[in-house]
Amino acid sequence: MSILDHKIDFAVVFSVKNANPNGDPLNGNRPRQNYEGYGEVSDVCLKRKIRNRLQDLGEPIFVQSDERKDDGFKSLKERADAIEELKKTKDKDLYHDVSCRTWTDVRSFGQVFAFKGGESTSVGVRGPVSVHPAVSLHPVNISSIQITKSVNSTTSDKKGSDTMGMKHRVDFGIYAFYGSINTQLAEKTKFTEEDAEKIRQALLTLFENDASSARPDGSMEIHHVYWWEHNSKLGQYSSGKVHRSLSMELKTDEPRSFEDIEINLTDLEGLDVKVYDGQ
């Protein structure tokens, strides 16, 4: 497998319909919005979904969510200590190299290994794949409904009182996020061209196996993935200029479907873009 030797930029456009793409725990788990009313999905949330898709593809993942654990370890420290080379060494360079070789997400996104207690070595890994937060192209409308519980949680002579709660959802929104893959950091983590292809595949199927009561199947859909591969390590253009070459305009003030936006690509001399439809 060859180390990635050329810069890559990418962009992803997706829609949300009657779903909560990323709840804000500091705001009653309402879908995230900025102060202007535009919907947001954090970069942490997006990387969580990419990790999940890589895990579904059979890749070894270090930061696994509890409900998707496939190795039985109860903590990140247990998972790291299960690798004998990591448990025994105090050499930070060796720890860096072994962790990158062992887990795809560490090799891609980086990781801070700093565990409390014992004599664990604190090691930081900078990953080559960076992901921006997703932002909607327009202010989103959020609907809230009240929910109740009509059964008893425990055995009792009396019927328990109904528990009141709230569910929130974005009625409809078109979101976009951007990212890049840096070759200098790829050399340090041994991130390969095959790894980049796996990231692309994960982006195309980002919401597969991600259904929940807040995000029913089909309520979140990837429409397009834009993939720019430069011909050099530094790239012919800055990531900012590449990302700006993709422009999206609303055809109506209140979009109700993906067809309500117009997407335009500005040609950058010597740099081609491949457009993939979501699967």
Image (cartoon, rainbow, N blue to C red):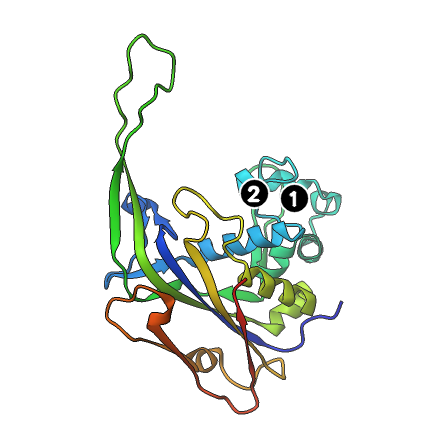
Closer to the camera in the image, 249 or 63: 249
Closer to the camera in the image, 108 or 59: 59
Disc 2 vs disc 1: which is toward the camera? 1
Residue type beneath disc 1: Ala
Q: Position of residue 111 (x, y in %)?
A: 57, 54
Would residue 173 appear left or right of 268 to someone viewing this image? left
Would residue 246 appear left or right of 180 to someone viewing this image? left
Asked if labels 1 and 2 touch by Cβ distance under 8 angstroms, the answer is yes
Q: How many marks?
A: 2
- Above or below, 18 against 128 in this view is above
Q: Please tell me the numbered disc located at residue 212.
A: none
Per the image, the residue denoted by label 2 is 115
Task: Kindly indicate the quadrant of the structure image that contains residue 101.
Answer: bottom right
- Above or below, 69 against 122 in this view is above
Residue located at (46% from left, 66% from top):
223
- For label 1, the SS is helix
Residue type beneath disc 2: Phe
Residue located at (38% from left, 51% from top):
22
Closer to the camera in the image, 77 or 175: 175
Residue located at (61% from left, 56% from top):
106
Q: Position of residue 135 (x, y in %)?
A: 36, 64
Residue located at (65% from left, 56% from top):
104
Q: From where the camera sits, is residue 126 visible?
A: no
- Above or below, 235 against 153 in this view is below
Q: CA distance from mark 2 to mark 1?
A: 10 Å
Q: Please tell me the numbered disc located at residue 80.
A: 1
Would residue 61 appear left or right of 244 to someone viewing this image? right
Q: Position of residue 46 (x, y in %)?
A: 47, 57
Instruction: Tell me the quarter of the image containing the C terminus.
Output: bottom right
Instruction: Give the residue furthest to the bottom.
Output: 269
Tell me the crowding category of disc 1: few under 14, some 14 to 19, or many 20 or more residues within 10 angstroms, Cα based. some
Task: Kindly indicate the quadrant of the structure image that contains residue 248.
Answer: bottom left
